Amino acid sequence: MKILVDVAHPANVHYFKNFIFEMKNKGHEVHITARDKDVSFLLLEELGLPYYNMGKGNLGKGIIGKILYVIYADFLMFKQFIKFKPDIVVSFSSSYAAHNCFLFRKPHITFEDTEHATANMLLYKPFTNMILTPLSFYKDMGKNHFKFKGFMELFYLHKKRFIPNPDLMKSLGIDISKPFVLFRYVSWGAFHDIGQKGLSIEDKISLISEAEKYANVYISSEGELPEELKKYQLKIKANDIHHVLAYTSLYVGEGGTMASECAMLGTPSIYVNSLPLMGYLKDANDHDLLHHLSSYEEIKERMVSILKKQKEVPNYYKSQRDKFLEGKIEPNSFLIWLIESYPKSKEILKESPDYQNKFI
């Protein structure tokens, strides 16, 4: 079988890397198309996965530049379809994969977990054969919508797939016997980020000063840090960040993906964002693993409270994680079955959604 996997974001590399390796080991041919977003290319290169460069994700500033990019990416993907001739395509909400699948009459299996990405949904939904979302996804995506018992982050952070490495932490110079806080700053460049903004530089500096009273501090950032914050910058391979998240006492960041990753690992997080919570993040919030805040004073107060609780009740958040993930599937095995058995697998799931329990 010839499988095309489209990668539009660094998180997508993590979602599909185990699936790609396993499908290759089973004798399938896998071709990757990837957008130049943050560390996507670096992640693929560190994993030794060749890819086709789909460009930067915009052809100018603002929404017009993003729309122009969709047209451009449709053309690039068209050329890849002619060259590779895929039998089936897997993506995370890729409109240009969907358009070409419709044109070439090939099945498009996509994942989605971002309810407010409405504009992009309009671009791919009519041309997609199967849209898979977590159970917590609260929108109805129509007749081709299927909810799986899991989260995207379990593709790479399920206990069968990921074991935190204390030796790696030692090599990074991080003493895991002492508490530390990881701050994460994003570029605010995604389609659904338009009109959003994070904390000011002054707020960030003040929060770091407060956190240092209780723990060591490290920063991960999509963009260039101001001079006064560079001493905190974490120097690490892109693929190793999840080991840091597993050991940190608290994550404070503007990136929802890392906040969700923390929930999978039993690490408390403060998610700094002015948008309403997406379903999968609300689920983590309801289990006290994620705290959705936007004002400086709220963040400061909650940060101190969590760091104190970590010291007083060390196993609290790991216990909450276990409750949170009870009954969830190992999604790689599920996806491999779905693709290898398609379209019969789609009919099975329509008739019996609980068939997926075989993959718990």
Image: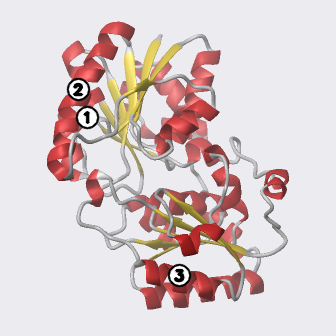
Q: Nearer the viewer, residue 94 or 335?
A: 94
Residue 28 x/y as whole percent: 54, 12
Q: Residues within 10 Å of mark 1 (few under 14, many from 20)?
A: many
Horizontal side of 172 relative to 204 (left or right) equals: right
When the figure is inspected, residue 117 is found, relative to residue 100, above or below; the finding is: below
Q: Which residue is mark 2?
A: 74
Q: Earlier in the sequence, mark 1 or mark 3?
A: 1
Q: Which residue is mark 3?
A: 205
Residue at 26% across, 42% down: 58
Rendered view: 281 above or below 18: below
- Viewer-proximal residue among 97 and 316: 97
Amino acid type, residue under disc 2 in the picture:
Asp
- Residue toward you, 10 or 112: 10
Query: Relative to 178, is 203 on the left or the right?
Result: left
Separation (CA) of disc 1 from disc 3: 39 Å
Q: Mark 2 or mark 1: which comes first in sequence?
A: 2
Dot 2: few (<14), some (14–19), or many (≥20) neighbours within 10 Å?
A: some
Q: Residue 292 shows which numbered tag?
A: none
